[in-house]
Image (tube, rainbow, N blue to C red):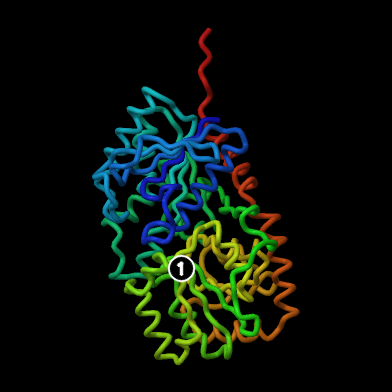
Amino acid sequence: MRVALISEHASPLAVLGGEDAGGQNTHVAELAAALAAAGHEVRVYTRRDSVALPVSVRAAEGYEVVHVPAGPAEPVGKDTLLPYMPAFSDWLVRRWGADWTPEVAHAHFWMSGLAALGAGRRAGVPVVLTYHALGTVKRRHQGAADTSPAGRVDYERALGVAVDRVVVQSRDEVRELVAMGVPRSRMTVVPSGVNLETFSPVGPVADRDPARPRVLTVGRLVERKGFQDVIRALPAVPDAECVVVGGPPAGAVDDDPHARRLRAIAASCGVADRVRLVGAAPREEMARWYRSADVLVAAPWYEPFGLTPLEGMACGVPVVGAAVGGIVDTVVDGLTGDLVPPRDPAALGAALRGLLADSDRRFAYATAAVERARDRYSWARTATQLVEVYAAVRRPTRVVA
């Protein structure tokens, strides 16, 4: 099958860790690779954000990345990209008409949905949409700090009715979309996956002090990821160190405003000597960090899906997670980890203290976590489920007598 993945701001080739470079980039890259490995012809369309980028790049994993000239050829924050979506859509129509026409377009994020739907209607290509994040949830948790374009929620609601299929990643997202007015019958639940070759219990381990328990937390340095709550929980966990992986490169961490706030919180809590911000790590080194941890903490205020808990589970690490979004689906409370209320350092500290004091429970959680990741969340399984969705919406080819 010829499959177009539309990811307007999240290139699969981007360096992770920036404000707009995180889970969606990884998702699109891994999905494209899994589809290509299954024999499908895959092209990823993403916005050209540098004059140095060629029109297309062939990824080593067998898919093509096409850089769409929509807006200035420079980095632009995703919340200011909406005016460039008509140009993105127009370019897709011209390209598909003259070059290569997909049998299905899978849009990632709502603005990609706008671009894909506009092009798909003109080119006769069915469109599948994965939101990755919803404006209603962002507004609820960020309030006045939400920088989303005006009308985002209305666009998302309209897209949910207009596209051929909505692919949701968690039960929480289903509930949110139904409340917005998107019919449940238009949705198919297909969770994200985890690379089981990259993330496994066996392999190199990052250096650590074996006498000091390690609590690991991973993600971009933005407030909603809840790192400040993890640090505030640390006084309840004597002797443990907290290692934060993510954000800018190691040499630039001290210049990051949120990193400075985290250090100030650690100092005010009396745990500055037990908090380590290591900055961004290359994706190929992340498994080393996961394997070095006694416990992985994922404590976001909200999380559409959450790849880091899955990556930790695949590496055999028990997870203490906030009971939000997709984490409620991936982490089974009392089996692969513990779930706690979001934005509750006291509950988080109690859960960490109890788990670090119980090596038998940690071992049981770790064993179950690996099994769950392998059984339910391989990218091959995700790709197979999505191909079934693509086949269901693909339009029959006309046979000319």
The reply to whether residue 329 is in sight is no
**Looking at the image, which residue is at 59% across and 53% down?**
193
Number of numbered discs overlaid on the protein picture: 1
Q: Position of residue 238 (x, y in %)?
A: 57, 91
Name above or below for residue 381 compared with residue 310.
Answer: above
Mark 1 crowdedness (10 Å alpha carbons): few <14, some 14-19, many ≥20: many
Q: Position of residue 122 (x, y in %)?
A: 35, 29
Name above or below for residue 123 compared with residue 136.
Answer: above
Q: Quadrant of residue 251?
A: bottom left
Outermost residue toward the top in this view: 401
**Looking at the image, which residue is at 57% across and 78% down?**
215
The answer to whether 37 appears left or right of 173 in the picture is right
The answer to whether 51 appears left or right of 250 in the picture is left
Give amino acid for label 1: Tyr
Q: Which residue is mark 1?
A: 302
The reply to whether residue 104 is in sight is yes
The answer to whether 103 appears left or right of 338 in the picture is left
